[in-house]
Amino acid sequence: MERRFRLAALWGATVAAVLVAAGPIGPAHAGPRPDPSPQPAPRGMLDAMRRDLGLSAAQVRTRLAQEAEAHRSVAAVRRALSAPPAGMWFDPATGRLVVAVTGAADARRVRDVGAVARTVPHSRAALGGLVRRISHRAGHGVPGVTGWGVDERANGVVLRVARTRRGPRTDAFERTVRGLGARTRIPVTVERSDQTPRQQGGSVVGGERWMPGSEGICSIGFSVTGPGDFQGFLTAGHCTLTPDQAAYGKDGSLLGMSNQGGGHSVNGREGDFGLVGVDGPGWTVSANVAGQGGTPVAVTGYQEGLVGMSMCRSGQSSGWHCGQITRVDQTVDYGNTVIEGLSFTNACSAPGDSGGSYVTQPSAPMALGVHSGGGPATCGNFGGPTLTIFQPIGEALTKWNLRLKTGSP
């Protein structure tokens, strides 16, 4: 895939902490570095994290400071290592970044930059190779299989299966994947669930409503600018499938055009992201995302999504909810399309949130990605563990030469 070659090429350069979950890595677009001591969080963020993560106010502030420090360690680790790490994640129990490496020299380098080193047998290249073989065997999808990807903390691969949709082809594919794992000695975990992921389609402010002319109701992700005088916003690709479609704002007025020229919507292996141009009378783009109770939260840049870190998401259906990133670099089979490079969280969502904003939690919030889909356990209608899925934002910015609209925290 094109994204893999871009990823490999950029590892040789000095890379800051940017959003990447199997997508391309680009230069960091970050705001001022936060102080490692606990910082005041916007009140809405503080309240939402207390509600959704079960933390006290003091625990939230400590957690945010630890996560900010871990993100600084991510950049230092990447500069120091001789090869991409087998995995990285934030450990909420210790408040530190954990880095999986395969050799003693790299383990020493990890410790030298203040992170926790974990020596593992399988490199990132080996894990990625197994994932590519699984993708090749899966083709356009296997009934009952909802996705697969690297399991960083287990130094293996995970295959996700829906109990309610499994059949003979599902079982045969599971045996094939286990066989591939056995030949490479890479552990394969099969996660069985009753949940089947689905895409949740339903001044410009992230998380607020926008309406494609004939494709339902979706949510705004993040405002962007581009070559010339272009201004617009990123959203989900499955919200922008029709070329040159009128786009309407939350008040019903024309705000611009979706997927202009037919080359600004991706909903397949490459990802789930789309672009809407904003040129309607009275409409301008902003750095804001609708936070708790609609209170604006200004993004100051974009950043890498890291397993174990807290985040909040905003969508026009369910509003503002927080959780943790549970997996990155995952392939998801939505039934109608197979998409690579997605990230999972345990924050709740609802139909109509598609395209909405995912942000980090420091006092200078950073954009993570746009909402792609989720399971049936929606906000206010819990039927089991919540699952939401987002598309990292870096790929769209790189593909279309866009700049994220940023502001002051």
Image (spheres, rainbow, N blue to C red):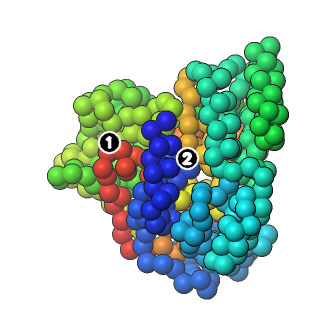
**Nearest to N terminus: mark 1 or mark 2:** 2
Q: Which residue is mark 2?
A: 22
Question: Which x, y percent locates residue 339?
Answer: 55, 33
Kindly state the secondary structure of the residue where label 1 is placed: strand
- Judge from the rendering whether residue 22 lies leftward or rightward of residue 282; answer left or right: right
Q: Which residue is mark 1?
A: 276
Cα distance between the residues tagged 1 and 2? 24 Å
Closer to the camera in the image, 384 or 81: 81
Kindly state the secondary structure of the residue where label 2 is placed: loop
Q: What mark, if any, has residue 157 been given in the picture?
A: none
Identify the amino acid type marked 1: Val
Closer to the camera in the image, 317 or 188: 188
Q: Residue at x 52, y 80 (%)?
A: 34
- Judge from the rendering whether residue 7 lies leftward or rightward of residue 205; answer left or right: right
Q: Select label 1 or label 2 by which is in front.
A: 2
Q: Residue at x 67, y 30 (%)?
A: 134
Question: Which x, y percent locates residue 209?
Answer: 42, 45
Q: Is residue 336 visible?
A: yes
Question: Which x, y percent locates residue 228?
Answer: 17, 52
Whether label 1 touches label 2, CB < 8 Å = no
Q: Is residue 346 visible?
A: no
